[in-house]
Image: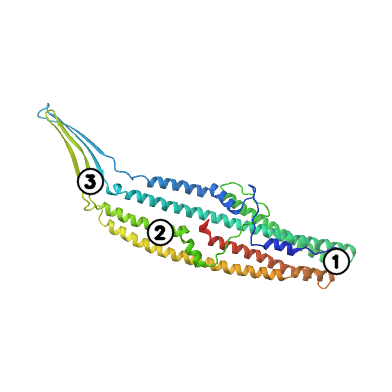
Amino acid sequence: MITLYISYKNVLRTLISGCLLCSGMAYGQNSSDEVLNLIEQNNTQIIAAQKTLSATVMDNKTGLNLKNPEVEFEHKWNTHNPGEKGKEVSVTQELEWSVISGQKKQLARTKNELAEISFRQTRNAVLLEAQKKLIEISFCNRMIQELNTQLTDADSLVSIYETLLRNGSGNVLDVNRSKLNRAAIATEIRNTNAQKEVLLQDLYGLNGGNTVSLSPEWSLSPLALPENFDSWFQQMEASVPELNYYQKDLELKKKSVRATKSEMIPSLSVGYTGEFTETERMQGFAIGMSIPLWENKNKVKKSKLDVEAAQSTVSDARQRVYNNLKAQYVQSVELKKSLQMQQEALDNLNTIPLMKEALLKGEINLMDYLNEMTRYYDFRKNLLQTEKDYQTALADLHAFEL
């Protein structure tokens, strides 16, 4: 007699223990963090953003010094007296208060910090996309493992009913049903493998056209769900790039007000001047002043309004980020509860050996067995789907920590 019993409980324990386990890559035994580090190095969008950041930083470093000195030379002659000639020389330097006081350098540093935060946002968005691809790939690997277990069971059914048919105690219909069941599972395995190949191709693109080869058993390391949202948010608020960006922009606006006020101070120019004729040599210094009567009108008012707008934006951004993260946290909590409930229900079931025993004793027919096992397998696959949704929700929650 051919036995049908397969140790599903051991396979299932391997599948769902700890949520997600870490395995290896073609580059060595790499964790998901190492995969993301690899993508960070090779991703073309991140590389382009880095170059843009470097160009922006260099641009912000320009214009931080005093303007170039002005040199004038005049050669004069008397048309009525050709022998009478004169020369004038002057060298002047304009003094800008915003440069002398260092305000321009402070503005440049803040602009650079703002550009770095913007780069970090781009980087995090790319890495979050990559992490979600890894979650999908991990799900496909685990689903394929589950389907392979089902395929083993389906193969054993085909073998049994073919043996029964040869012995004269079976029928062709049951053999055909068992083969259709096996074909359906094999088709689902192929479809899942095809989905996985698409995800690996996406990962190939995110890795700058470099292959990321993951083993068939590879799965993603689990992320942690904070115990208390408000405490976690207070600790992590300073690390959220979006909030950092608006806070830094507010700081920039405040510094711009001070710089604009300095532009209302009359600018001075100092220098040397000399007049030389054939009979006289006169030398001295020159002082000039530019009085800002019209050019900078309303600039200070505009800068102050910019500060008020930036303050409102900071408040709005904080509330918006808080609400979004709170919604993601609540979703994660509910998914975790659902996952635990499904795991507990599955651990308490003894469906497989009971159904097989009933089938072998003739208490149920093959159709009843297949229908019942289909419901059972669907429940197990739903558990894997819930697990994937849970990990995706956690990835969104922790996106700014990448």
Amino acid type assigned to the residue bearing label 2 in the image: Gln
Would you place residue 235 above or below residue 358 in this image? Answer: above
* Structural distance between the alpha carbons of marks 3 and 2: 35 Å
**Callout count:** 3
Where does label 2 land, which residue?
247
Q: Quadrant of the N terminus?
A: bottom right
Q: Is residue 61 left or right of residue 184?
A: left
- Asked which secondary structure carries label 3, the reply is strand
Q: Earlier in the sequence, mark 2 or mark 1?
A: 1
Which residue is drawn at the image coordinates 50% and 53% (left, top)?
123
Q: Residues within 10 Å of mark 1 (few under 14, many from 20)?
A: few
Q: Is residue 111 left or right of residue 198?
A: left
Q: Residue furthest top?
A: 83
Where does label 1 land, which residue?
171
Viewer-proximal residue among 18 and 356: 18
Check if mark 1's residue and mark 3's residue have beta carbons within 8 Å: no
Viewer-proximal residue among 333 and 297: 333
Would you place residue 181 above or below residue 25 in this image? Answer: below
Q: Is residue 380 left or right of residue 126?
A: right
Amino acid type assigned to the residue bearing label 3 in the image: Leu
* Structural distance between the alpha carbons of marks 1 and 3: 107 Å
Q: Residues within 10 Å of mark 2 (few under 14, many from 20)?
A: many
Amino acid type assigned to the residue bearing label 1 in the image: Asn
Nearest-to-viewer mark from 2 and 1 = 2
Where does label 3 land, which residue?
268
